[in-house]
């Protein structure tokens, strides 16, 4: 399960294993069944309460994944930055998008103007 964006409120409810709506209930069941839960937290700056909730989610099996821009790929556009974050999130689920470069790879020039098409299968 991927929660994007994940507010600090949702993070807090998930961290405390309280299910007060469909989103937090689904996240709770995901953790209960030992499935992958990725939370793309969106708010900064963080205070100690936010950090403790992130630690708690990590301790109970979740992954906290703030969509922080990565500049080592030398993005040319905002879309390049978003695409890179999406690719990294999909990697956490074992989904490989062949049009998206990995560390040390270059993005093909034609891909920058075309829509990204995911070619993967869930096993």
Image (cartoon, grey):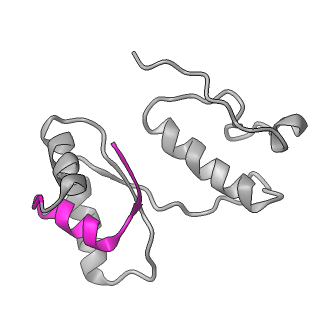
* Residue pictured at 55% horizontal, 21% vertical: 120
Can you say whether 91 is above or below 65 in the image? Answer: above
78 drawn magenta: no
**Residue 27 locus on image (x, y percent):** 22, 49
Side of 16 relative to 42 (left or right): left
Quarter occupied by the C terminus: top left
* Residue pictured at 18% horizontal, 66% vertical: 13
Q: Is residue 72 visible?
A: no
Can you say whether 119 is above or below 17 in the image? Answer: above
Q: Nearer the viewer, residue 26 or 45?
A: 26
Q: Nearer the viewer, residue 12 or 60?
A: 12
- Please identify the residue farthest to the front as the structure is shown: 22
Q: Is residue 21 visible?
A: yes
Residue 59: image quadrant is bottom left
* Residue pictured at 16% horizontal, 51% vertical: 25
Can you say whether 122 is above or below 50 in the image? Answer: above
**Residue 121 locus on image (x, y percent):** 49, 18
Residue 57: image quadrant is bottom left
* Residue pictured at 68% horizontal, 41% vertical: 103
Can you say whether 27 is above or below 67 in the image? Answer: above
**Residue 89 locus on image (x, y percent):** 50, 45
Quarter occupied by the N terminus: top left
16 drawn magenta: yes
Side of 90 relative to 51 (left or right): right
Figure label count? 0
Side of 101 relative to 123 (left or right): right
Q: Which residues are magenta?
A: 1-19
């Amino acid at each position: 399960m991927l929660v994007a964006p994940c507010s600090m409120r949702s993070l807090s409810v998930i961290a405390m294993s309280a299910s007060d709506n469909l989103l937090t209930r689904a996240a709770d069941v995901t953790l209960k069944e030992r499935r992958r839960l990725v939370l793309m937290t969106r708010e900064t700056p963080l205070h100690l309460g936010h950090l403790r909730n992130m630690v708690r989610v990590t301790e109970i099996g979740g992954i906290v994944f703030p969509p922080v821009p990565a500049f080592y790929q030398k993005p040319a556009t905002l879309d390049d930055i978003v695409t890179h974050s999406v690719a990294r999130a999909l990697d956490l689920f074992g989904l490989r998008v062949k049009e998206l470069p990995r560390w040390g790879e270059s993005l093909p020039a034609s891909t920058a103007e075309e829509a990204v098409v995911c070619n993967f299968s869930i096993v």
